[in-house]
Amino acid sequence: MGNIEKKTDSLLRIRQKAEELYLIKESKYSSPLSEWETLKLIHELEVHQIELEMQKEELILAKEAAENAIQKYTELYDFAPVGYFTLTNSGFIIELNLSGSQLLHKDRSKLINSQFGFFVSDDTKSAFNKFLDSVSNSNKNECCEIKLLLEDTALTNVYLTGILSENKEHVLMTIVDITDLKETEFALTESEKRYRDLLNNLDVGIILHNKDASILYSNPKASELIGLSKEQIKEKQSFNPIWEFVKDDYQQLPVENYPVNQIIRTKKPLTNFTIGIKKPDITAVQWHFINGFPVFNAAGDISEVIISFIEITELKKLEIELTKAKESAESANRAKSSFLTNMSHEIRTPLNGIIGFTDLLMRTNLDVNQKEYMSAVNESATILIEIINDILDFSKIESGKLELNVEEINLFDITHHVIDIFKFHAEAKKIDLILNIENTVPKFVLGDSIRLKQVLVNLVGNALKFTKIGYVHLSLGCDLISGDMNQCHLHFSVKDTGIGIKQENQEKVFQSFIQEDCSITRKFGGTGLGLAISNQLLGLMNSEIQLKSTFGQGSEFYFNLTLERGQHKNTSGVQEVKTVDENNTFSCIDYSTKTILVVEDNKINMLLVRTLLKSILPGCTILEASDGEKAIKMYKKEKLDLILMDIQMPHKNGYQTTAEIKHLKKYNNIPIIALTAGIMLGEKEKCLESGMDDYVSKPIIRCHLEEVLYKWLKE
Ligand code: ADP
């Protein structure tokens, strides 16, 4: 403003000066000018010319500035992201910017003088007319949302703002394309609706907590489960006197362990949390299964916590009932196990007597018939004891109580021993019993010899049982495992030319108490437990029996075992004993001076042991104690060389008696030999742990007792 005023002033001054000079000039021409006056006039005129030139330059600069400003304004006007329109009051376009023409998809020149309403969709035309009317008749800024119907595109959503021009003749209008915004808004609304529908219809209670644990939102299922309306739930804290949370054991859940508080404290999701809700109006506890997670904001702080829950009261009841049922089943199982143990003891004790005495009797002078009958009695009792062992093994495996005893074992000894067991039986049936061990098979491996032998005995025994003519072939091969020289992959196979098994029965025979068919059972006998037990034993060694069989032609039962190679050491002293000539060694030592105490509560067993001792060590002194207490007294009184100790005795069992004797240390290292039934889990280990030095399994067989006596009395 100041500049313009200055310029106007200077122009006025120049004008004034020019007028004055003109008057002087006029008066001077009327009378001749002096030389000085002429020079002055010329000077004035020259200065004035310079002034005029300067003014001209200023005007050029001002013009350029004005043109620049116009250019900038035009650019701003044209390229603004908003369409600018100048309309008449009746809606005709007088002027518009480039963005406006682009919005309407037409050249600017073609739009001038056309009616804007022509581009407005039918359904929003009345809104536009109302907008135009309001702008034309007020001084206020007006706005509205309409849709434009353009030739080549779908509907375009636009937002209009309008105001009346200063001269009140035109409507100045801006247009913004809000199609994308609308689409986003629509998608958002749709998705919100979808989630709301989902939440409302979900059969799971959902509660949204604020970061201070107060409730922001709950879905209808949550209301149903909690028994409060949405409004009642809202803004309540999860700790509320209306309900009380309890743990699995019905004890109150501390507030800090409420699901939402746990999530806020740990900042971690909570999964599968069971909670009981106690409410004053309901006597029974309602059980809920809860999951939840925190929602974090951009700064990494918890902004909300979402909890979902389902009611599991019925399931919980079922679980309680199942737990009770499981407990009672377990206690029944314990009762069964203890019954089995007791019964087996009760049955085995007389059987041991029968086997021991028939064995002794068969060594006396019997006639042929008597010998035959006696061996029938002995065999029957042996079969009976094997059946009892099978049933006990089975119940031990079933209850998971059977563990393997892994040590260095001699595969050659084991397989030869299996063949030895059946040699006479095979000869009697005129069946070839063949053992084949490939030369790649290592002699020593780490395994459980008793259980491996048990499996092979069962398979070879079955093969012989079900074969009338031909052969039974036990073979053992070995593949090396590449990269590991310590491991070997053994292949055991028992093949026969027996009756074979029908295809449809081949799976069935591995089930417990199942035999191929009943007629066979009657003909061949058996319990149907052998294969099931063998398979379970192999299961403990990570293997299983496979079967190839053709009905009427024969069967092959085979399995693979991956075992570690042994270090080629002899494993027990027992083997050393075997290599010594018994008669020779016995004759070197005088056993008549030895005193042996037999601790045994069963009279028949006592008689058997005494008889065996007398025949093995004629002349030795035998003392007897019928229970642990008497044994301890005798130990204190007598000078003993060896004790044979029964395990299961009334008042004080064999373990306790041994422990006390060892504790007394009257004289060091008196050998105590257990007379063990050898069937219960860890019984042998328990014997050694309680201080016993060795064991003889019942039924006591003369040669076993001989071996042990020799070993310990010699020492
Ligand atoms: P058990 O021999 O005591 O009956 P197993 O479990 O050992 O019990 O065998 C189950 C059944 O499988 C047998 O009863 C018999 O029907 C069938 N079986 C087993 N081994 C053979 C075999 N080598 N040849 C034919 N059948 C066999």
Image (cartoon, rainbow, N blue to C red):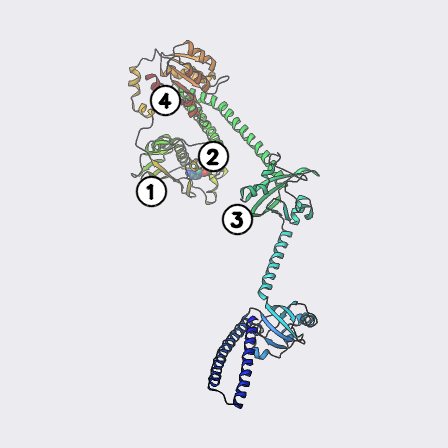
Residue denoted by label 1: 481
**What's the CA distance linking mark 3 and mark 1?**
54 Å
Across and down, in percent, residue 600 comes to 45, 17
Q: Which mark is residue 703?
A: 4
Q: Is mark 2 within 8 Å of ligand 1?
A: yes
Q: Which dot, 2 or 3, sits closer to the camera?
A: 3
Q: Amino acid at mark 3?
A: Gly
Categorize mark 1 by other alpha carbons within 10 Å: few (<14), some (14-19), many (20+).
Answer: few
Going from the N terminus, do you reach mark 4 or mark 2 first? 2
Q: Which dot, 4 or 3, sits closer to the camera?
A: 3
Q: Is mark 1 within 8 Å of ligand 1?
A: no
**What's the CA distance linking mark 4 and mark 2?**
30 Å
Residue denoted by label 3: 300
Can you see residue 704? yes
Q: Amino acid at mark 2?
A: Leu
Dividing the picture into quadrants, the one containing residue 557 is top left
Going from the N terminus, do you reach mark 1 or mark 4 first? 1
Number of marks present in the image shown: 4
**What's the CA distance linking mark 2 and mark 3?**
64 Å
Residue denoted by label 2: 529
Image quarter for ligand 1 equals: top left
What element does badge 4 sit on? Answer: helix
Across and down, in percent, residue 386 comes to 45, 29
